[in-house]
Amino acid sequence: MRLRLVCLLLLPFTLMAQTTVTENVILITMDGLRWQELFGGAVDSMIANEALTHDRDRMTESYLVETAEARRRRLMPFFWDTLAPQGMVFGNRWKDNKVDCRNPYWFSYPGYNEILTGRADPAINSNDKEWNPNVTVLEWLNQQEALTGRVAAFGSWDVFDYIVNERRSGIPVNSGFDLAEGNDLTERERFLNKLQEQAPRLWGSVRPDMFTHNFLLETLRKDHPRVAFISYGETDDFAHDGSYNRYLDAAHATDAMWRDLWTFLQTDPQYAGKTTLVITTDHGRGDSPMEKWKGHGDGAPGSDAIWLAVIGPDTPNHGEVTTNQQLHQDQIARTLARLLGYDYPGPGGGEVGEVVPGVMESGRR
């Protein structure tokens, strides 16, 4: 009896009393989408800039209306009309609600490492294909008995194999130009494989988001993972190309894919009413002078400004949060785990960001 008590006392505080309705979490990132467009829609001065925007008449007709609230709904109608009212959205700096990166670099690998580990690591300072030495929250959750083999990751950028460390973590990562693999491929997966091989490559390391999205959807249908991560990449790459019109169209198309995902989640018994979406970005972009929008990093002031949304059965339906508040990117990992009833200790047991306050309402059903 005494030995049993000692063993119980020595157990790490990883699994908490399950008080949440959430049984599944999908972490979604839209690479490099600025908070300015998320909360204010298309910027008229950027559409008017001939160097940044082609097809300006269509852009004006499609995205420019009178108010910021109307513009953001034109750009991302599903997010603002359906998702946001069912959760909380943080990061509108015009209303003194801020979300920032803690890492000092403000580009992709450091940002994704911070999102996924709950800690900014100064040693992660490039986008090189190097195996992440840090254990991510995805890998840690995959080590929990109830979730082993129930975690999957998808990304349009081909570095996610390394960020998630597929080799060590054992988590299947479909990223870049990876094809669906296995002996039980569905007809849709075989078609996606063929289509991806036939599609033109717009960038050397990033595939079109339509493939990433549909590989995720088919895995959700077939395997029903309880934790999934997906990163959409076109917004960042079109911005690097200096194409504001394609950046806007990519954001609009991603919003439509989220509608597709949400519709599936509401009709599948595994996910309906039991799934939380955590949506964010890895970094912001520059904004002054206007051409700085093409890039990001510590040479583009404002690139550390990001945003965050949490939508699910445990989250109050406050919509856009307009109170004066400061959040950070390193809070996402622990929040994700807590939604599933776990207390994530972080890589190596060191300090990690705290759970985002207010996103889990006690007793909400």
Image: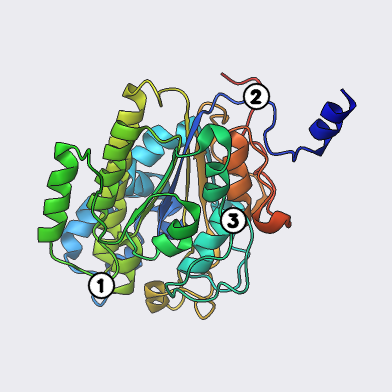
Q: Which residue is tagged 3?
A: 117
Q: Which residue type does callout 1 highlight?
A: Gly
Can residue 170 be seen here?
A: yes
Q: Residue at x 65, y 24 (%)?
A: 19
Question: Mark on residue 19?
Answer: 2
CA distance for labels 2 and 1: 45 Å
Disc on the earlier residue, 2 or 3: 2
Q: Residues within 10 Å of mark 1 (few under 14, many from 20)?
A: few
Q: Residues within 10 Å of mark 3 (few under 14, many from 20)?
A: many
- Figure colour scheme: rainbow
Q: Which residue is tagged 1?
A: 204
Q: Which residue type does callout 3 highlight?
A: Thr
Q: Position of residue 290 (x, y in %)?
A: 40, 75
- Residue nearest the observer in this picture, 249 or 128: 128
Is residue 75 left or right of 229 when viewed as pictured? left
Secondary element under disc 2, as helix, strand or loop, is loop
Q: From the viewer's perspective, is residue 308 above or below residue 36?
A: above
- Residue nearest the observer in this picture, 22 or 329: 22
Question: Mark on residue 36?
Answer: none
Is residue 155 left or right of 335 when viewed as pictured? left
Q: Residue at x 56, y 43 (%)?
A: 143
Q: Position of residue 65 (x, y in %)?
A: 31, 50
Q: Position of residue 223 (x, y in %)?
A: 34, 34
Q: Position of residue 328 (x, y in %)?
A: 63, 56
